[in-house]
Image (cartoon, rainbow, N blue to C red):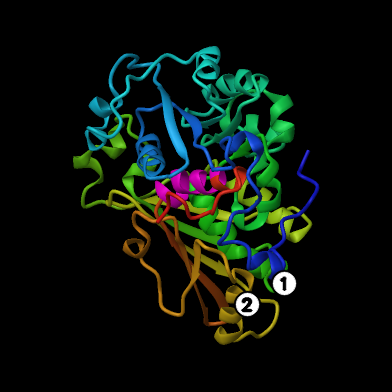
Amino acid sequence: MPQTSPPNPLSEAERGDRNRASLPLAASERGPGGEVSSVKVAVLGGSGYTAVELMKLLLRHPYAEIVAVTSRQEPGKPVSADHPILFGRLDLPMENFDPAALKAKGVTCVFGCLPHGASAEAIAPLMELGMRVVDLSADYRLKNPAEYEQWYGQVHHDLKNLEHAVYGLPEFFRDRIRTAKLVANPGCYPQTAILGLAPLIREDLIDRQSIIIDSKSGISGAGRTPKLATLYPECNENFSAYNVGVHRHTPEIEQALAHVAGERFEVLFTPHLTPMDRGIFSTIYTTPKRIVTEAEMLELFRRTYAGEPFVRVRSTLPTTKDTAHTNFVDLAVRVARGRIVVLAAEDNLVRGASGVAVQNFNIMHGFDERLGLG
């Protein structure tokens, strides 16, 4: 069933609190003298792009301690051997997935960087052992299991935890993330679309039947496993669309926007592959219900995201380089030929995956949301 409480921007008082710790730390997260102690974390599936990006962020987090990294393909191999950028910083051997062993190491929070399907299988036993989880797969994003089966081609095997999973878009679900045991990290494309459309949807300013989301992603969005379409000779000096109108992120976008609108509707989402390492750029076309001005729309976006630490509303047009290696989403809005056009840029590996996962970790543990994120 859909989550019952719709996402709302925080009050003015809460906005002033965003750049401080979300909640007082639990006693288990403080030392005997009241000092803050580190949270022992594990990373499941340590060989991929999102995993290495996540570990880089966690290594600079003052209160996160990586004590385990799992890999089904390469147990025993040092993390730094798979990711040389971590040489001398994280050399512990990767290990087979064993919930009891993670518990014995004192792990209290787990980041899942596994593929969909495999993630739900691993997370269920971790939840039974009382660990908190930030899952970077798609397994817990869609609240309707039939919809998950339709778009991902398999039956969901963890309905118990699916029911309680919280969608991890901080700007709209922050209060629920704070106390969540399981956070479904949002997808990369959906964040640009949801954040770009939410102010317009909430104010009922646009026709909900004619929304077009045109998005471009760097090659790293396809993952680290070699595929013909992402080999250098195939994608260099090339630009292509894929999964037109049938991309798996479509229902995620529609589900989140339904919370804002109070009703379900469809969007036309077309992703493209562009020959760059990282980054997402989305151009969103909407039809207003009344005459609006660009200044009015800019003020609406600034008001909606006032105080948000990782959303920047700009008067100039964003680019992917502006957000590369950061947790920022940059938004701009234009009124052109009777349309409202929203432009959004983010780093698909940081804000699109690992960065927002760390932001969710911070919210869950009462830390300043910016810790580890610059």
Residue at figure coordinates x 58%, y 27% from the top left? 153
Q: Is residue 138 above or below residue 126?
A: below
For badge 1, the amino acid type reads Glu
Picture quarter with the C terminus:
bottom left
Q: Which mark is residue 300?
A: 2
Residue at figure coordinates x 64%, y 19% from the top left? 129
Secondary element at image label 1:
loop
Circle 1/circle 2 CB separation < 8 Å: yes
Would you say residue 186 is visible in this rendering? no
The part of the chain drawn in magenta is 349-361
Picture quarter with the N terminus:
top right
Residue 187 covered by magenta stretch: no
Q: Position of residue 273 (x, y in %)?
A: 36, 49
Mark earlier in primary sequence (1, 2): 1
Residue at figure coordinates x 69%, y 71% from the top left? 12
Residue 352 covered by magenta stretch: yes
Q: Is residue 77 above or below residue 368?
A: above
Name the residue beneath numbered marker 1: 203
For badge 2, the amino acid type reads Leu
- Which numbered mark, 1 or 2, is in the foreground of this view? 2
